[in-house]
Amino acid sequence: MTSGTTVAEPVAITHATLLPGDLAGSVRPRTTVLVDAHGLISAVGPTDEIDVPPGTRTIDATHRFVLPGLINAHAHLFSDGRPLPAFLVSPRVERLALAFLHSALGRRYLRGRTKSAAITQMNTGVTTIRSVGDPGYEVVEVGGAIERGQYLGPRLIASGPLLAIPGGHGAPQIALTATDAESTRTNVRRNLQHGVKAIKISATAGVTDAKEIGYAGRPEMSEANMRIICHEAHEAGVLVAAHAQSGEGIVSALRAGVDTIEHGAELSDEAIALFQHNPESLRGFSALIPTLMACLPLVKLDRSITGANPVARANAEWVLDGMLRGIRQCLDNDIPLGMGTDSALTFVTHYNTWRELDFLIRYGGLSPARALHAATQGNAHILGIEQVTGAIEEGRAADLLITDADPLDDIRALARPSAVLVRGRVIDSPVVEEFPEIDRLLDDF
């Protein structure tokens, strides 16, 4: 699926139109980017002012566009986004599947699925992925293999299982559960001991497990237990994300100190103030990561296609409306706004990250420049990795993608990059497996 190499070589991308991913939507024509043998950007400047060292591989990007590698801040890697056959969706089959996934053979299967998903996202220009809810620690293991140079892959920020209450959102499939303070503390420490670099909380119920109309967004974990989780994670320098789909759930999670709210809802004045200045968060502020792809197919497609029951459909519409209101409030109040796809959910494939940006533009009211910023410099700042990646600047990792058309004119230009660089390693003409039946449905929105 990729022609990239795990051995870096000096690279020069010349005569490019540079899109740095800033809020202004800056465009820098006739620019050269030099990448050293360590996979770091060593120089950026006008092509006629940059000398390309002898022996450097040169990529002529005349009439092409170079931008920072995309950062997916809300992903799952255990499935490919295709709908499950109806006979597999039953409590009995779910129990059998859960037992299998926690067996030795199941863990091996999950590692394979995780690796495939990560490489697929990489080949579409996603060079950093934060997972936010895994069956086990397979994303930690795959990320470790990538860091050791066993194969080329994106930078992975793994959460491991999310933290929930018994019967709460994500439980038991991808969650550790607890109700009392000591068990809550034990669960977060267990994740940290397994090497996670992110922590995820289910602060509220969700669409996929809603039991009645209006159930999605119902507060689940207590503010006191969320505060314990945030304290333990922050002591280890790890950011905390919270699934929250109601105003009440968002405020409770922010008071507890979470660093990112996932999905979102309409925001109260208190929530807006806490996003802007959150003394309990790790870095003094919190951010919103909306995921329009998680709801739009359920709302836009007929239930005969999605298989959603009336309760799930009604909750998806309610959550989508709240999420869109929250996005617009972030834009109006200068709240940090990121981008995540919720990949692995039904109809959310690993190669369609560009669609989330498209939906943010068409439904969320973001400008193309603001959407690109959310997926690059914005997400890097939110995740605390801005000194490593997310920008085309000297000293940053050479995580880049090259497109034949300008994504500021048509975001679909991101669908098939002509090349991707991951820590300086070049993937020429990347190819991924696509699912035409899903794409035809999504193209009709």
Image (cartoon, rainbow, N blue to C red):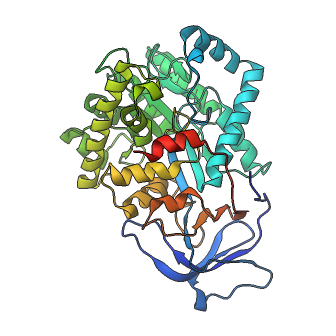
The residue that appears at 59% across and 30% down in the rendered structure is 134
**Residue 265 at x, y percent in the picture:** 29, 36
212 relative to 59, above or below? above
**Residue 332 at x, y percent in the picture:** 23, 54
The residue that appears at 68% across and 47% down in the rendered structure is 119
**Left or right of 115 in this view: 127:** left
Looking at the picture, tell me which residue is in the foreground, 68 or 233: 68
The image quadrant that residue 420 belongs to is bottom right
**Left or right of 424 in this view: 443:** left
The image quadrant that residue 389 belongs to is bottom right
**Residue 187 at x, y percent in the picture:** 55, 23
Which residue ends up furthest to the bottom in the rendered image? Answer: 48
Q: How many marks?
A: 0
59 relative to 338, above or below? below
The residue that appears at 49% across and 23% down in the rendered structure is 170
**Residue 391 at x, y percent in the picture:** 52, 65
Question: Can residue 336 be seen in the rendering of this structure?
Answer: no
Question: Can residue 329 be seen in the rendering of this structure?
Answer: yes
**Left or right of 268 in this view: 312:** right
Quarter placement of the C terminus: top left
Looking at the picture, tell me which residue is in the foreground, 222 or 22: 22
Looking at the picture, tell me which residue is in the foreground, 256 or 337: 337
Which residue ends up furthest to the left in the rendered image? Answer: 269
